[in-house]
Amino acid sequence: MRALFPGSFDPVTQGHVDVLRRAALLFEEVVVCVMFNSNKTGRFPITERLDRIRAATTDLGNVTVDSHTGGLMVDYCHRVGIDVVIRGVRGVPDLDYEMPMARMNHELAGVETFFIAADPALAHISSTLVTSISQQDRVPE
């Protein structure tokens, strides 16, 4: 079974990679797909995000990397024959955000959502936080 791990990955974080590694153990193939998020301003070009994801997953033979920046995620799933979406959740706020989308994806296209709980040691990490810290030229101690 193939699964899709969608996100803006702007930038890809240790948390993303952890969820991806665990998903790769569960599914025959995991397609990591850089998607456009209208609620976010892109900091890195799509090509750089794709390169960073490829670099972080070189040892995962069943992971492929793609992008889809026009149209709905379910349209991409339908086009490439994927029926399962992977979502990492750090806590209740993430789940509250993800549940309506999961229901809509199922309603629109029969796409199921598989939630993977974040590693507690990485649950505080977000792309926004990583970017904020890097803009200040600071590294967490």
Image: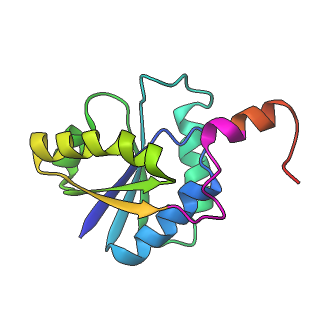
Asked if residue 108 lies left or right of residue 90, the reply is: left
Q: Nearer the viewer, residue 57 or 13?
A: 13
Q: Position of residue 49 (x, y in %)?
A: 57, 41
Q: Is residue 79 visible?
A: no
Indicate whether 42 appears above or below 74. above
Q: Which residue does the image show at 45% across and 55% down from the upper left?
A: 88
Is residue 22 in the magenta section? Answer: no
If the image is split into quadrants, where does the N terminus sit? Answer: bottom left
Q: Quadrant of residue 114?
A: bottom left
If the image is split into quadrants, where does the C terminus sit? Answer: bottom right
Q: Which residues are magenta?
A: 118-130
Q: Which residue does the image show at 53% across and 43% down from the upper left?
A: 9
Seen from this angle, which residue lies furthest front? 92
Q: Quadrant of residue 84?
A: bottom left
Q: Quadrant of residue 57?
A: bottom right
Q: Nearer the viewer, residue 96 or 24?
A: 96
Q: Position of residue 136 (x, y in %)?
A: 85, 31
Q: Is residue 29 visible?
A: yes
Q: Which residue does the image show at 42% across and 22% down from the upper left?
A: 38
Main SS class of the magenta portion in the image = loop
Is residue 119 in the magenta section? Answer: yes
Indicate whether 20 appears above or below 110. below
Q: Which residue does the image show at 37% across and 31% down from the upper left?
A: 69
